[in-house]
Image (spheres, helix red, strand yellow):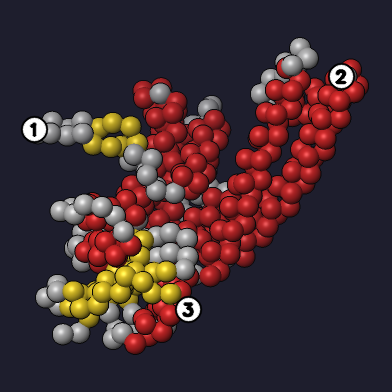
């Protein structure tokens, strides 16, 4: 019978394939396929459904396989792991491919949206900017640590560290002056690079009509709008806004049993970068709501009073995620509550 489902275990050089027919019987078992042979093997297959784990290179291969008429599905690795360990001992590439093929056939499996080359190139800007911000934070902490060795303790604020280190630079011994001076030079260079990437992000956000609509949502700026659009596209892979919020890890984890509902902290699964952007936007939104009398500000401040500051921040971020899904999926403008 014809092959219906194929699981591929991705790698750098050697890939493993496992295909089954309509009855679930293994019809294609290739534990070692060289990278240069993979496209040729897939091209010879009849149109079928191909499953892979969402990892480095998965979106590239998905776009390549779609050109041959195949339906491609990407899955989170942690959702595939139970099928690999069930009833089997040990782990190898062939077992991974069989587990991917098995997980692909589950009716309730959740899949990862396939990104286009343009979306991935835009996310490259976000990834590099995120790395530069982390590098700048490490540089600031390094300067603070070196200064504390000489009795100069500075607060955590970045601008205070810049001014304080520059003010005490001439009072330091020779080699300490050299080391901290170089650190300040690196910090200045990182500030310029981050400002440059901020302009790139702003340009990306302004170029798309959908991201411009997202930026009308309170708490959503250019960085959040461009990253969200590049990650989920028009949001049609989610049935509703709550699914997007759950995918971002902003819904409570359940520990319910015996008819008793127990809700814990948020799950924190999914894309941590998108979640942090929405959280930061919600935090700024809550701070700006103090003293305002509109409906949204009154709801945010009353929620913070009842549930606490951070619970309110997460609730606002989850609400913004649902609104963003509606703006993208329905193609409508954001309408502020009356």
Pick the front one: 76 or 297:
76
Q: CA distance from mark 1 to mark 3?
A: 54 Å
Task: Name the N-terminal-most of marks 2 and 1.
Answer: 2
Residue at 63% across / 52% down in the picture?
Answer: 128
* Circles 1, 3 touching at the beta carbon (< 8 Å): no
Residue at 53% across / 27% down in the picture?
Answer: 290
Residue at 56% across / 58% down in the picture?
Answer: 123
Q: Quadrant of the N terminus?
A: bottom left
Pick the front one: 114 or 97:
97
Image height of 173 relative to 85, above or below: above
Image height of 64 relative to 318, above or below: below
Image height of 74 relative to 228, above or below: below
Q: CA distance from mark 2 to mark 1?
A: 66 Å
- Residue 300 quadrant: top left
Residue depth check, mark 3 versus mark 2: number of the one nearer the observer = 3
Q: Which residue is mark 3?
A: 36
For the residue labelled by badge 3, is the local secondary structure a helix, a strand or a loop? helix
Extreme residue in the top direction: 151
For the residue labelled by badge 2, is the local secondary structure a helix, a strand or a loop? loop
Q: Is residue 207 visible?
A: yes
């Amino acid at each position: 019978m014809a092959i219906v489902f194929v699981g591929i275990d991705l790698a750098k050089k050697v890939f493993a394939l496992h295909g089954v027919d309509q009855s679930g019987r293994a019809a294609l078992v290739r534990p070692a396929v060289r990278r240069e042979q993979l496209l040729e093997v897939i091209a010879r297959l009849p149109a079928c459904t191909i499953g892979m784990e969402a990892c480095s290179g998965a979106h590239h291969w998905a776009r390549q396989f779609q050109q041959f008429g195949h339906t491609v599905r990407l899955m989170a690795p942690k959702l595939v792991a139970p099928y690999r360990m069930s009833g089997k001992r040990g782990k190898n590439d062939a077992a991974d491919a069989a587990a991917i093929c098995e997980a692909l056939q589950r009716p309730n499996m959740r899949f990862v949206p396939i990104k286009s080359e343009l979306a991935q190139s835009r996310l490259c800007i976000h990834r590099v900017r995120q790395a530069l911000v982390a590098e700048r934070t490490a540089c600031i902490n390094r300067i603070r640590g070196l200064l504390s060795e000489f009795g100069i303790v500075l607060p955590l604020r970045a601008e205070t560290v810049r001014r304080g280190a520059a003010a005490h630079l001439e009072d330091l011994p020779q080699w300490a002056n050299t080391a901290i001076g170089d650190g300040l030079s690196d910090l200045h260079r990182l500030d310029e690079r981050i400002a440059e990437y901020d302009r790139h992000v702003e340009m990306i956000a302004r170029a798309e009509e959908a991201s411009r609509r997202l930026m009308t949502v309170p708490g959503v700026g250019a960085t959040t709008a461009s990253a969200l659009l590049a990650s989920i596209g028009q949001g049609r892979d989610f049935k509703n806004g709550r699914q997007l919020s759950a995918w971002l890890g902003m819904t409570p984890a359940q520990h319910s049993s015996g008819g008793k509902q127990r809700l814990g902290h948020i799950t924190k699964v999914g894309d941590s970068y998108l979640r942090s952007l929405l959280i930061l936007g919600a935090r700024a939104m809550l701070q700006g709501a103090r003293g305002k009398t509109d409906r949204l500000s009154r709801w945010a401040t009353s929620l913070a009073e009842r549930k606490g500051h951070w619970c309110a921040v997460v609730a606002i971020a989850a609400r913004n995620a649902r609104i963003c899904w509606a703006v993208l999926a329905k193609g409508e403008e954001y309408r502020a509550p009356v």
